[in-house]
Image (spheres, rainbow, N blue to C red):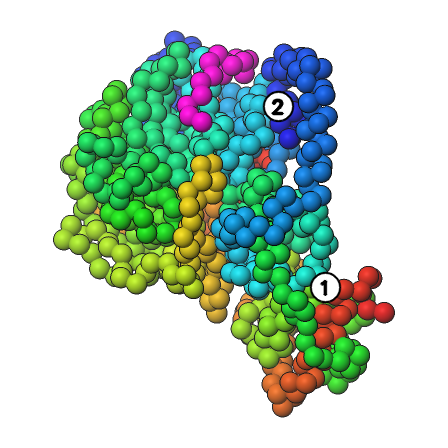
């Protein structure tokens, strides 16, 4: 599709563009027909409901998607649970096609074929994947019997979530922003994050072309003049660290200039066991995260 | 001799040996590339695959003063994996989406630019990448993502010949930099993710006529055919997607091959699956196989052997060494193909025993399972296509190591031409520790680790060594780094702004040494102020 615009060769541009123009004139009705059918093809799944195509889609899914979305599309630490009928970036066939083909800017969801994992898919293969996803969607997947209103009270109340986490502009900045977490993560993952925050650290910034996202590691530094800071790593490389301290102050350090630099994979987030947060309260909290993630503009 | 004087001497020598500075590259010049260290005449810098520059103007004493000299933006997305060539002040390189360009090596200003028109249905596995060119006479050679081989005019970028090697729609592509030997241009095919039948081709540099093809999965009646179950050899993969090396003394070219297909499912292809994951010693004139050494038999973890093998001489011993994707460092007699030893250089769990020849063999129970089976290294390997380097001054071999394990799962999958054919999936496993990487210095005499420099995360940058006592590499965080070759001490670093997915090189123009590396969409060069 983008072959035509790739004529940037100064040497070959002339003749190639000329022949293209001629070809276009001759083939114009055909091209128009092709464009129409392509546009149409991206609206509606030609394989909808076909179990054979769904099986082929599963092969594609394993090769291209499971790395983040998990086997069975149930979500992993990186990608949302796709067995939910409600999708964050649109639930219609055309939305899914666009999300898979174009990626989601500003998230870890890459363009089709742009990752190290997987080989990229043809339009037909994308439709097969969509057919597969439809086949594993579960009614009310991710729905839990919780009270979101009470969950909201808890979020902004005594458990202290909002001290560090923010939802729709209200709360702290030290920990991951949670407005869309309910849509982007599976219920199991959300619960695990509360009960065992050290098991899998939340992912922070994803840079274009960088294979692994930064994680919310805990960092403690002491500067040459003896000042000590503790906080989370916003980003890091071999020579520098960008951190936010527990008072939400941003710092940039050259590691070689620090008296000490220590990182741990013990999250700054406290462990909420059933003593500090009952199962029912956890359900309420998670149901609030799920609800708020589907509201336009976040929490109201 | 002072560094500057050495450069001057090198430049003077090149004048002596060549009719004129702007003379064309001849096969003799390629053989004697060490006589003109100001130029970088092939992908790995020399036929031995050492990625070593004899330039010594940039030293451990002055490296901390390195500054950017120029950058060239391809303005293309995706991984920029190329190593440029430099010939007498002109830099030739490829970019993403089969761009080719010639620049003034002193300023980075383009002299010509070419882009191959790619069809919309090409099937590259891992991005629209290309790793570089080969050069001979008035032509540079490039392999394309639609499996064409092109010869371009070095002066204009005009296409001199263009041949289609194979039907790209079945999953074939070229991503590697070709290798010129005498009057032939050699290249191997990519497509191990599509159930292709791998091969290495040689074309007449003048006409583009194919002179030979070596299929990396033997057909009926050929030795090795019995290592494939039924017709599985027809779709057995074994692509040869990294540039080979050449020993003119024995007239042998060495090429490496990748995974058998499907990469993560052994069912249906019982046997060793020759010549997947192998080192092949070929006669460059005929393509005839002299010997082979298979690193990973009947592979189920995508442990391609497509890492540049490096020719190292130790006294009377003529060796070829490779840090393999499967986590072992192999030292092989390059005249006989006999393994001398194999030692792990990174964490590995796929093998816990060796056969009588000392070759690591797969552990029972290391195969992918339907639910997933954790194995180290992961699918991306303990290293990958990014080049290692051998520094004859320090006597050390340097390689980018990746410490990452994956959970390998498997599922039956029918072959469908031109469609991904993995039979599997894999995931990063939930290790308590994050994945990381390191630049490792290995003594090829015993395979022992001399030093390592830890990277924050696994990286895809290759390594260059120079006579200034420096190794250069990059990282996933965007740094380009100079380290002392003997100790691993960091001398200098520069933030390029995007992960480095390429192997650096060095050249000189007007007596000034430069170091070049691709990162993001840009080719960066650095030099002394």
Inspect this view and state whether residue B372 appears: yes
For this rendering, which residue is in front, B143 or A99? A99
Task: Indicate the position of residue B348 as horizontal and vertical percent values.
Answer: 34, 59
Quadrant position of residue A225: bottom right
Task: Indicate the position of residue B438 as horizontal and vertical percent values.
Answer: 43, 54
Q: Chain of mark 2?
A: B
Residue at the disc numbered 1? A180
Q: Is residue B166 magenta?
A: yes
Residue visible at 60% across and 40% down in the picture: A123
Residue visible at 59% across and 58% down in the picture: A135
Cα separation between marks 2 and 1: 46 Å
Residue at the disc numbered 2? B109
- Vertical relation: A73 (above or below) B299: below
The tally of labels here is 2
Query: Where does the C terminus of chain A fall, quadrant-wise?
Result: bottom right
Instruction: Count neighbours of disc 1 (C-alpha within 10 A) and say few if under 14, some if 14 to 19, many if 20 or more.
Output: some
Magenta segment: B152-167
The residue at the far right in this view is A300
């Amino acid at each position: 599709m983008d072959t035509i615009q790739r004529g940037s060769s100064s040497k070959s541009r002339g003749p190639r563009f000329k022949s293209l123009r001629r070809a276009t004139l001759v083939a114009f009705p055909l091209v128009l027909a092709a464009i129409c059918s392509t546009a149409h093809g991206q609206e509606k799944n030609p394989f909808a409901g076909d179990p054979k195509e769904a099986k082929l889609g599963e092969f594609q899914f394993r090769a291209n998607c499971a790395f983040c979305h998990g086997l069975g599309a149930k979500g992993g630490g990186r990608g949302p649970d796709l067995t939910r009928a409600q999708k964050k970036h649109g639930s219609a066939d055309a939305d899914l096609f666009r999300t898979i083909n174009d990626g989601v800017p500003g998230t870890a969801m890459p363009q089709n074929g742009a990752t190290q994992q997987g080989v990229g898919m043809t339009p037909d293969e994308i439709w097969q994947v969509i057919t597969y996803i439809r086949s594993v969607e579960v009614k009310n997947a991710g729905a839990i019997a919780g009270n979101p209103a009470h969950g909201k009270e808890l979020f902004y109340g005594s458990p202290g979530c909002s001290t560090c986490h923010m939802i729709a502009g209200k709360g702290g900045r030290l920990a991951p922003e949670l407005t869309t977490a309910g849509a982007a993560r599976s219920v199991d993952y959300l619960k695990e994050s509360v009960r065992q925050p050290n098991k899998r650290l939340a992912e922070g910034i994803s840079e274009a072309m960088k294979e692994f996202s930064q994680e919310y590691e805990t960092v403690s530094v002491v500067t040459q003049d003896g000042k000590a800071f503790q906080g989370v790593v916003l980003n890091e490389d071999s020579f520098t660290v960008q951190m936010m301290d527990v008072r939400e102050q941003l710092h940039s350090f050259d590691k070689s200039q620090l008296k000490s630099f220590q990182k741990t994979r013990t999250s700054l987030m406290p462990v909420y066991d059933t003593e500090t947060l009952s199962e029912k309260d956890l359900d309420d909290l998670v149901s609030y995260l799920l609800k708020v993630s589907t509201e336009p503009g976040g929490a109201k | 001799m002072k560094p500057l004087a050495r450069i001057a001497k090198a430049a003077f020598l090149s004048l002596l040996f060549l009719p004129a500075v702007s003379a064309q590259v001849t096969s003799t010049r390629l053989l004697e590339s060490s006589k003109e260290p100001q130029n970088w005449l092939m992908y790995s810098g020399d036929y031995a695959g050492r990625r070593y520059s004899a330039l010594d103007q940039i030293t451990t004493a002055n490296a901390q003063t390195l500054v950017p000299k120029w950058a060239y933006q391809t303005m293309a997305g995706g991984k920029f994996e190329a190593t440029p060539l430099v010939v007498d002040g002109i830099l030739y390189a490829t970019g993403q989406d089969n761009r080719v360009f010639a620049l003034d090596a002193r300023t980075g200003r383009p002299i010509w630019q070419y882009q191959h028109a790619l069809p919309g249905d090409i099937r590259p596995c891992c991005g629209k990448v290309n790793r570089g060119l080969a050069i001979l006479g008035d032509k540079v050679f490039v392999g394309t993502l639609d499996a064409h081989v092109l010869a371009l005019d070095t002066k204009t970028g005009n296409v001199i010949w263009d041949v289609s090697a194979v039907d790209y729609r079945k999953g074939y592509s070229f991503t590697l930099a070709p290798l010129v030997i005498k009057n032939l241009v050699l290249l191997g095919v990519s497509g191990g993710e599509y159930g292709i039948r791998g091969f290495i081709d040689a074309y007449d540099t003048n006409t583009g006529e194919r002179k030979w093809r070596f299929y990396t999965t033997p057909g009926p009646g050929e030795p090795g055919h019995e290592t494939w179950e039924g017709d599985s050899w027809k779709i057995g993969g074994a692509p040869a997607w990294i540039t080979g090396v050449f020993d003119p003394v024995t007239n042998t070219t060495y090429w490496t091959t990748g995974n058998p297909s499907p990469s993560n499912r052994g069912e249906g292809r019982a046997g060793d699956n020759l010549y997947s994951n192998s080192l092949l010693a070929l006669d460059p004139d005929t393509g005839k196989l002299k010997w082979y050494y298979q690193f990973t038999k009947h592979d189920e973890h995508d442990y391609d052997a497509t890492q540049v093998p490096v020719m190292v001489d130790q006294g009377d011993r003529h060796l070829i060494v490779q840090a393999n994707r499967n986590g072992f460092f192999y030292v092989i007699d390059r005249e006989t193909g006999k393994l001398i030893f194999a030692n792990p250089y990174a964490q590995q769990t796929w093998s816990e025993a060796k056969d009588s020849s000392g070759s690591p063999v797969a552990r029972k129970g290391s195969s992918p399972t339907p639910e997933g089976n954790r194995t180290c290294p992961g699918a991306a390997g303990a290293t990958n296509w990014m080049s290692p380097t051998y520094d004859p001054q320090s006597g050390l071999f340097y390689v980018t190591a990746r410490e990452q394990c994956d959970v390998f799962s498997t599922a039956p999958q029918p072959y469908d031409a031109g469609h991904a054919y993995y039979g599997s999936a894999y995931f990063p496993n939930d290790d308590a520790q994050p994945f990381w990487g390191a630049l490792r210095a290995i003594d090829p005499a015993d395979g022992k680790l001399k030093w390592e420099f830890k990277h924050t995360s696994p990286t895809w940058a290759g390594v260059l060594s120079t006579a200034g006592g420096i190794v250069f590499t990059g990282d996933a965080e965007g740094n380009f780094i100079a380290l002392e070759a003997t100790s691993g001490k960091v001398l200098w670093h520069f933030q390029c702004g995007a992960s480095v997915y390429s192997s650096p090189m060095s050249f000189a123009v007007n007596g000034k040494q430069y170091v070049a590396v691709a990162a993001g969409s840009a080719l960066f060069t650095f030099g002394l102020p």
